[in-house]
Image (cartoon, helix red, strand yellow):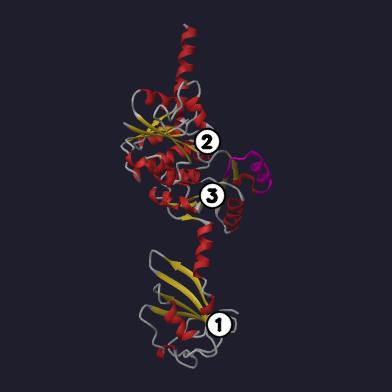
């Protein structure tokens, strides 16, 4: 599959690397050229040598999205550190470029829930953290 | 009318003040603590502290009963999100969004967020429409309706001087709607006679500017000059 990932922070870069290792074609878009180093960190070969693609830019710039290959993307992952940015760019990927599968990181559980109802595949790290804490509390109480 | 304004920077603050002075009920939402505190004295309960893209903050401000939501933060994604949520989740009838970067205009359109207002675009439009050599000023362009309202000063050599309005055969698609003379304006009747120095307001189909100018200011003095 051809996957475009916007935002190569901790989550984005880890997902990018595992997707590449799983044999997918992966293109990463991030406004910070330094985030490229996160993709390389601890690896024997560089991100490009492994076959990964990297573009510097923001996802609101149509040219940057096109350069990153969105027109042939089968999967679009929005994982910048901005909830609103992720929600907007994923709708652009869906509505303007017709990407089939769009996955959005939304920290705020309330916004994640509402946009999930609207048909976006949202993942809220905070929801997982809350559930984990609640579970840990229960275990200790037993 | 109950209006929620998200973002209390220069635009939001002044908008809020104007709306309040016109008798509207207004809540400004500002996420910067310092800015909020500085405004609180002035606006009292009309300003609330919080991130206006958080649903509970919007609900606390009473978005369910808002007649109009205006998003004027410095961040286009935030403005788009606020308006999208206001319209689709809270069924707010009217929204207005500010576009910071004119290149994002298409994104607002794509997500159905209209009207989206960009200061840069407004100024550019003024510059594009300013046609000094004709003495013609664009007052309003109704793009969707494909109409324009212009103002022209009647120059001393204009062929229409001394002619009754009913006898001026203007091109199809144009109409004199008002005449400004000696500091006051009136709607002309058929027997109103055009004088040099009159300022004439016309409504017309776009593209007729040049033809119209030939009637009122053939050699192009500037309106108001």
- Which element type, helix, strand or loop, lies under badge 1? loop
Residue B149, relative to residue B11: is it above or below?
Answer: below
Q: Given contact means CB atoms under 8 Å apart, are the residues at marks 3 and 1 in contact?
A: no
> What is the spatial separation of the Cα atoms under label 3 and label 1, in whole angstroms?
39 Å
**What's the chain of the residue with tag 2?**
A
Dot in front, 3 or 1:
1
Which numbered disc flags the more N-terminal residue, 3 or 1?
3
The label on residue A135 is: none
Judge whether residue B109 is colored magenta: no
> In the drawing, what numbered circle is on residue B72?
3
The kind of secondary structure element at disc 2 is: loop
Gap in angstroms between the C-alphas marked 2 and 3: 30 Å
- x, y percent for residue A28: 43, 34
* Visible residue check, residue B176: yes
Which residue is farthest bottom? B162
- Say if B29 sits above or below A130 in the image: below
* Marks 1/2: CA–CA distance: 55 Å
x and y percentages locating residue B67 in the rendered image = 47, 51
A56 or B92: nearer the viewer? A56
Q: Main secondary structure of the magenta part?
A: helix
Q: Which residue is mark 2?
A: A33
The stretch of residues the image draws in magenta is B29-42
Left or right of B22? Residue B95 is: left
Q: Which residue is mark 1?
A: B221
Q: Percent from the top left, x then y, of residue B132?
A: 54, 76
* SS at circle 3: loop
């Amino acid at each position: 599959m051809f996957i475009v990932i916007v935002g190569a922070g901790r989550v984005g870069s880890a997902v990018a690397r595992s997707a590449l290792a799983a044999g997918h074609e992966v293109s990463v878009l991030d406004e910070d050229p330094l985030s490229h180093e996160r993709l390389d960190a601890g690896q024997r070969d560089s991100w490009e040598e492994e076959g990964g693609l990297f573009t510097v830019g923001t996802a609101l710039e149509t040219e940057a999205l096109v350069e990153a290959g969105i027109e042939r993307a089968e999967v679009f992952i929005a994982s910048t550190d901005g909830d609103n940015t992720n929600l907007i760019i994923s709708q652009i990927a869906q509505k303007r470029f017709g990407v089939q599968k769009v996955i959005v990181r939304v920290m705020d559980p309330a916004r994640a829930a509402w946009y999930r109802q609207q048909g976006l595949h949202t993942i809220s790290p905070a929801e997982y953290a809350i559930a984990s804490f609640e579970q840990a509390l229960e275990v200790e109480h037993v | 009318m109950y209006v929620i304004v998200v973002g209390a920077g220069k635009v939001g603050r002044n908008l809020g003040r104007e709306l309040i002075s016109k008798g509207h009920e207004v809540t400004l939402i500002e996420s910067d603590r310092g800015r909020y505190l500085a405004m609180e004295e002035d606006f009292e309960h009309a300003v609330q502290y919080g991130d206006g893209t958080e649903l509970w903050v919007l609900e606390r401000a009473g978005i369910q009963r808002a007649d109009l939501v205006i998003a004027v933060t410095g961040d286009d994604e935030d403005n788009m999100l606020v308006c999208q949520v206001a319209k689709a989740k809270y069924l707010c009838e009217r929204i207005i969004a500010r576009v910071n970067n004119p290149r994002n205009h298409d994104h607002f359109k794509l997500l159905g967020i209209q009207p989206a207002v960009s200061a840069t675009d407004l100024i550019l439009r003024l510059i594009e429409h300013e046609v000094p050599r004709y003495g013609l000023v664009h007052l309003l362009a109704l793009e969707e309706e494909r109409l324009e309202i212009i103002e022209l000063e009647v120059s001393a050599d204009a062929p229409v001087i001394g002619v009754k309005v009913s006898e001026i055969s203007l091109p199809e698609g144009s109409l004199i709607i008002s005449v400004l003379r000696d500091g006051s304006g009136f709607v002309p009747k058929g027997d109103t006679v055009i004088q040099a120095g009159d300022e004439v307001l016309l409504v017309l189909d776009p593209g007729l500017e040049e033809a119209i100018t030939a009637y009122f200011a053939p050699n192009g003095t500037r309106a108001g000059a």
